[in-house]
Amino acid sequence: MVRRIMHVDMDAFYASVEQVDNPHLKGKPVIIGASRRGVVSAASYEARKYGIHSAMPVFKARKLCPHGIFLPGRKERYREKSREIMVILERISPLVEQVSIDEAFVDISGTEALHGPPGDLGEKLKARILESTHLTCSIGIAPNKFLAKIASDMKKPDGLTIIEEEHMHTLLSQLPISKIPGIGTKTSTLLDRLGVRSPADILRRPQTFWMEKLGKTGSCLYRMAQGIDHSEVTPYAAIKSCSAEDTFPEDTQDLHLIKKWLFHQAEAVARDLRHKGLKGKTISIKVKYRDFKVATRSLTLPGATNCTQTIFQGACRLLQKLHKAQKIRLVGVGVSNIQRGPQQMSLFPNPEALRSERLDSAVDKIREKYGHRMITTGLVMDLDR
Ligand SMILES: [Mg+2]
């Protein structure tokens, strides 16, 4: 059976959600990322015309587009929308692999009898997502994940691109090498130096050459240049970690304040895990000091968790190891070593853990019903964000 993989990528996701929720923002340059010292996390297509793109420092974006609308972003709302989209995808095939908040692969091999030809399914899906969320997406359909991802990027926004096996080689000979997903700075510098412009240029040298130069990345690159990618669409496998981080409005050494941010992040991460039915065993924190040096520390628990309190307490323990004489610019909390599904019930459950679990699920329920702001823990109430 021919493999058919679909890659669905929402268009300017955060910015588009803002434009849908606030119609007066439609047609305007909307930039998510308002903190003076942070970076842009999304830019509407109107803002991209000014050369603004994600990961650009906010101050630079402000210079490029002084009349742009800079918003702080509402992660909870984006997660909500993301969930809505994933549910729509899961109705097509159980093989949905969410790769980020606004991106997923769907294995649609053998679904023609049920859903019609891939092109029709793509159109139908786009219409369904638009109808339910008022958001547009771009879809790529190809014989494997790697090519599907390239395809979804080809006609953005609101595009649908199908790459057939027989056209693959022509496409790869014309594609700029920068379009290959996942090429880091080091590799791209080397490729540039070697005069590699397209995937076809990679094949001018033997695989051994690339393995010598780049190791594992080299052999992967060689395979991709031939359009080969056997990796499967595996639900949940892509979620290797879950994290949140914030740059403070001002550098600080105030332990109490830093812990408030950690709590807010632990809460976001834990809730995300609970939402996806996942737990993680390793808690980590990241600290960026005033001089931009970054340090990380992690600890591994005896059992996996998605409990806000447990993650927060772990993060606080780690913070003690990193709290130095220097002021701190950014903190982040992450959970990795992810496991799926309910953990085996303990014969002698720890009453404190049970209490925390019940509290988490009560908070989740209230928020689902009345919105995120409805309930806030005392610790984060006066947090300015
Ligand atoms: Mg996207």
Image (cartoon, rainbow, N blue to C red):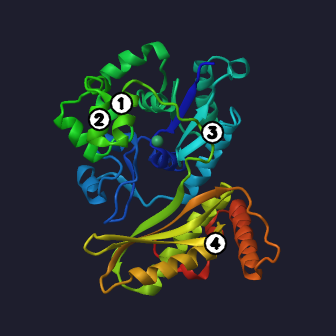
Residue 100, compared with residue 135, is above or below; it is below
Task: Say which amino acid is labelled 2.
Answer: Trp
Residue 296, compared with residue 57, is above or below; it is below
- Callout 1: 10 Å neighbours few (<14), some, many (20+)? many
Q: In terms of secondary structure, where does tag 2 sit?
A: helix
Q: In terms of secondary structure, where does tag 3 sit?
A: strand
Real-space Cα separation, disc 4 to disc 3, in angstroms: 30 Å
Q: Is mark 2 within 8 Å of ligand 1?
A: no
Mark 3, residue position: 96
Of label 4 and label 2, which has the lower sequence position? Answer: 2
Of label 3 and label 2, which has the lower sequence position? Answer: 3
- Numbered mark located on residue 222 in the image: 1
Residue at horizontal 26%, vertical 25%?
201
Mark 4, residue position: 302
Find residue 324 and report its horizontal and vertical position in percent: 34, 84
Real-space Cα separation, disc 4 to disc 2, in angstroms: 41 Å
Q: Nearer the viewer, mark 3 or mark 1?
A: 1
Task: Say which amino acid is labelled 3.
Answer: Val
Task: Say which amino acid is labelled 1.
Answer: Tyr
